[in-house]
Image (cartoon, rainbow, N blue to C red):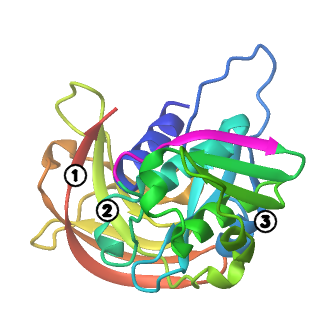
Amino acid sequence: MKRFLRSCILFLVVAALAACNASERQSTQAEKPGLVKATKAFVKEFGPAPTVEKGTAYAFVIYFPSAKEPGKVLPFPFFSFDEASLKKVALTKLIGGLGDLKSYQGEIAQPFPPGTRLLELQQAERTATAVFSKELAAAWSDQGVVNAVVLTLKQFEGVDRVVIRVEGAPGGVDKEAQKADHSAVLPLGPPRLLSVTGMKEKGAATVEEVDAFFDRPVQIKELRLSAADGSPFEGEIYHSVFDMAGVLKPKSPAKFSAGLPVKVRWNVTDKVGRNSSGETQMVLEVREH
């Protein structure tokens, strides 16, 4: 379970692509196999949900506005263990954006003005009403924002209609919201490598593992991590939770420090058959948990 929590937290820090609100559950009964429940939108974009060892997780999509094609959105996978807060988590992460992801530099827009907050999320019958703080007033009619909010919320069971309101502004964005449909979703290309990160216990001198993160769940056919001179780092490699990363358990952890150049060679396939292979050099980030 420790590795399970660590992988979730790490994905939040590195990619801002996961909403992993995990809490360890105690039980006197025999543990049952874990379960991941995915929205139809997730299955459409990323294929069958990955497995999990313990608990019940939820897989969903957040649609981020495109910087290259105004009005269009790009889907990203997210996971959470808190069913009750899925919609709020999704909108909060949408507002926060994806951060500085070099693999998507220039492709993801951040149209939400600084300070924008989700004030309230209500649902009456099959209509979800999202109320945002006054900062969104300058962008609330942006079709990219509208499409992102509406499509993110509509994937959840019981939501057929979305209303967007802004604090202090009369009325709501209704006409634009009802125009939002999946024609606004840009097709995904092959999987992308996002980062290489070493993870260690708080205060520890060396890392426990080195993770090569991808932008979606993948099947790893080949993953090699090497030093700048090409000499391979020895250790066992396995999948992370949710299949979002290849994890190296290094035999010589003392070699890994922040800023270390790491060559990555990969060959991966996502759950709908899109393949990606390549080789690049990245700078190692180190995080504590």
| Picture quadrant where residue 267 is located | bottom left
Q: Nearer the viewer, mark 1 or mark 3?
A: 3
Q: Return the residue nearer the eye: 182 or 36.
A: 182
Disc with the residue nearer the chain's start (1 vs 3): 3
| Picture quadrant where residue 78 is located | bottom right
Amino acid type assigned to the residue bearing label 2 in the image: Ser
Q: Secondary structure at mark 2?
A: strand
Where is 285 relative to 47, above or below?
above
Q: Which mark is residue 285?
A: 1
Q: Which mark is residue 40?
A: 3
Amino acid type assigned to the residue bearing label 1 in the image: Glu
Q: Return the residue nearer the eye: 211 or 66.
A: 66
Q: Is residue 8 magenta?
A: no
Residue at x 32% of width, y 65% of height = 101
Residue at x 72% of width, y 77% of height = 179
Q: Secondary structure at mark 3?
A: helix
Q: Which mark is residue 79?
A: none
Q: Return the residue nearer the eye: 131 or 254.
A: 131
Q: Which mark is residue 195?
A: 2
The single residue placed furthest to the top in the displayed view is 28
Q: Which residues are magenta?
A: 114-123
The single residue placed furthest to the right in the displayed view is 125
Q: CA distance from mark 2 to mark 1?
A: 8 Å
Amino acid type assigned to the residue bearing label 3 in the image: Lys
**Horizontal and vertical percent position of residue 90:** 59, 50
**Horizontal and vertical percent position of residue 22:** 58, 33
Q: CA distance from mark 1 to mark 3?
A: 34 Å
Q: CA distance from mark 2 to mark 3?
A: 28 Å
Q: Return the residue nearer the eye: 224 or 14.
A: 14
